[in-house]
Amino acid sequence: MEKGKLQEYWKINLGYLIGLLVVWFVVSYGFGILFVNQLNAIQIGGFKLGFWFAQQGSIYVFVILIFVYVALMNKLDKKFDVRED
Amino acid sequence: MDVQMWTYTIVGITFLIYIAIAVWAKAGSTKEFYVAGGGVPPVLNGMATAADWMSAASFISMAGLISFMGYDGSVYLMGWTGGYVLLALLLAPYLRKFGKFTVPDFVGDRYYSNAARTVAIICAIFVSFTYVAGQMRGVGVVFSRFLEVDITTGIIIGMCIVFFYAVLGGMKGITYTQVAQFCVLIFAYLVPAIFLSIQIANNPIPQIGFGGAGADGIPLLEKLDMLHKDLGFAAYTSGSKPMIDVFAITFALMVGTAGLPHVIVRFFTVPKVRDARISAGWALIFIALLYTTAPAIATFARLNLIDTVSNKSYEGLPNWFKKWENTGLLAWMDKNGDGIIQYTGKNIGGGDAFEGSKPAFTKETGAHGEPLLSNKPNDNSNELYIDKDIMVLANPEIGGLPDWVIALVAAGGLAAALSTAAGLLLVISTSIAHDLVKKQLNPGISEKSELLFARVAVAVAIVIAGYFGINPPGFVAEVVAFAFGLAAASFFPVIILGIFSKRMNKEGAIAGMLVGLIFTAAYIVNFKFLNPGMNKPEFWFMGVSPEGIGTVGMLINFAVSYVVSRFTPAPPQEIQDLVDSLRYPKGAGEAVEH
């Protein structure tokens, strides 16, 4: 593959990484730790929201993030013709 | 059948399954031994990774820790799952593309240096042995309680089983055994949780149940907060650790997860780069099944425990309390002689019931039939000693569940401990046979001799691990936390920089690893072993505990690597081309030996 296209592929990949890692940081360190007290003022069912993010919500989001990344990259691999057969 | 018979039967059957798989999956080549031939389907690899990853600490200790720590226990939940996002996005696909057998292999080749390889081998062995000691201890705890043998015998039985399938099957045997072990451990974990959730919250899904309400209509978590307040403990849903420490510990556990050699090596075993990405996703789904259930178990167990023991007369306690006293994991010291159990926390003058970290029984019994202790009582109102490890193991008995469930939990605990131990032992053996002997000492070694060498190395590693299990260096989960700090401070930066910075050279990598590792190890050893009396927030560096110090070690590693690499020559062109080729999937091929 030519160098320019490879660089473009890598740049888009890095863009995905940064976007997904921002979400990763916000749900765990943001909602679960830094703003936990503020979010705990909101109660859904028997859960305080900040506590819920720390013990449940962030884990669900982590799973979703990986599958979103897989889907994005599979599409990107095809577009740039670097997909393995 | 009684509990004992059920336990022998269920544990026996699972052991037979593991051995049968080992015989079926016997490794014939080094490639099968190191990376299971590189052809494991992603879903199965996800299960194997989950079992490899979920250790005795996850299965036995974690829910117990959370039930005592409440919100503070979230560090384990987020930390031990969030690392998989880093693995899937930042490490797994590139390492798979690189296509070698081990992490030291990557470090050695990417940094074109046998010195870097050697540092990585030392890190891998150090991290793995730290971690494996905790696993063997976990095996001992489960055996001693459920098979009523002493801990040493239990560990020796466990060693024999691991010996059989790790030595014979290598990675191939371990992978398929771990798939079976995952099924056993997740079933064993979910069954009692579902029973308890139905009993306590009237909801079959524990993840939802613990946000529900009991028969009195008060939400369980609110009730627990009130009980904690009344008994003098920190509020359950807000915890007591300072925010910076919660932050640092969570980060150290996440980055540590992404840097653990026995987890990373699992992504070398799938056929393609895209399989490496998705198998991290599968792994996290399988892990999340347990990790989202753990806080529910913690809440149920904590409520049950307080309801059952607090301010109750000793003579009227259920049978399970007395059974667990026999294992030394539970003890009551009637300080005020009223025959009633006072269980109190720091906020109203409670604390540790007596001096010494473990109860020492005198073999005599007191006025109410309780086993007497020779420990010196502490000057506070608390009378109860509870080892956190019993919260999961005793759960079925506390809930009054059928005997076969109790036996199942024993089998699950063993599966969790043995699968992780096997994965770690393989890392140790590969580091020695492949990275040290084949790559450095004797490159001309034949494949047959290398395979023999790998098998001998596993055998030796098992004996050493068993020794650490019998003479444990500390508490199960605590020891495991060290391994994470060390992995975070050594491997994570060196791999990330190896992929994402073409300019990173061998001088930077070696300096970073050494400084990160030495700083982190020195901090932990100082506070945990040399000066345990000083292990308090006012003496900690910026308020970060030894459990969270890996985060600082990692930052130091990154900083040192960066600075040193800027003052030393850039890596040669072929290395920069290698880094380029890591970055796109086509042409990854199979895991190859160079």
Image (cartoon, coloured by chain):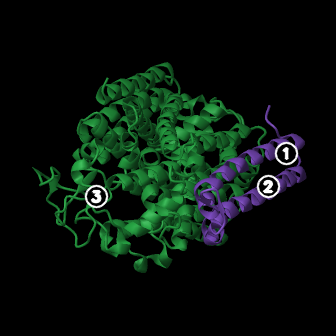
Residue at the limit of the structure toward the bottom, as seen here: B538
Can you identify the residue that label 3 sits on? B385
The amino acid sitting under disc 3 is Tyr
Q: Nearer the viewer, residue B292 or B499?
A: B292
Residue beneath the point at 47% across and 27% down: B169
Q: What residue lies at 61% left-to-right and 37% top-to-bottom?
A: B46
Which chain identifier belongs to the purple chain?
A
Quarter that holds the N terminus of chain B: top left
Q: How far apart are marks 1 and 2 (CA)?
A: 11 Å
Q: Nearer the viewer, residue B80 or A75?
A: B80
- Residue B583 visible in the displayed image: yes
Give me the C-alpha separation between circle 1 and circle 3. 57 Å
Task: Determine whether the residue tagged by mark 2 lies in a helix, strand or loop.
Answer: helix
- Is disc 3 on the same chain as disc 1? no
User: Which residue is denoted by mark 1 in the rendering?
Assistant: A76
* Among the two numbered marks 1 and 2 on one chain, the one whose residue lies closer to the N terminus: 2
Numbered disc 1: what chain? A
The kind of secondary structure element at disc 3 is strand
Does the CB distance between marks 2 and 3 fall below 8 Å?
A: no
Which residue is the site of mark 2? A16
Residue B508 position within the rendered picture, expressed as x and y whole percent measured from the top left: 60, 65
Residue B491 appears in view: no
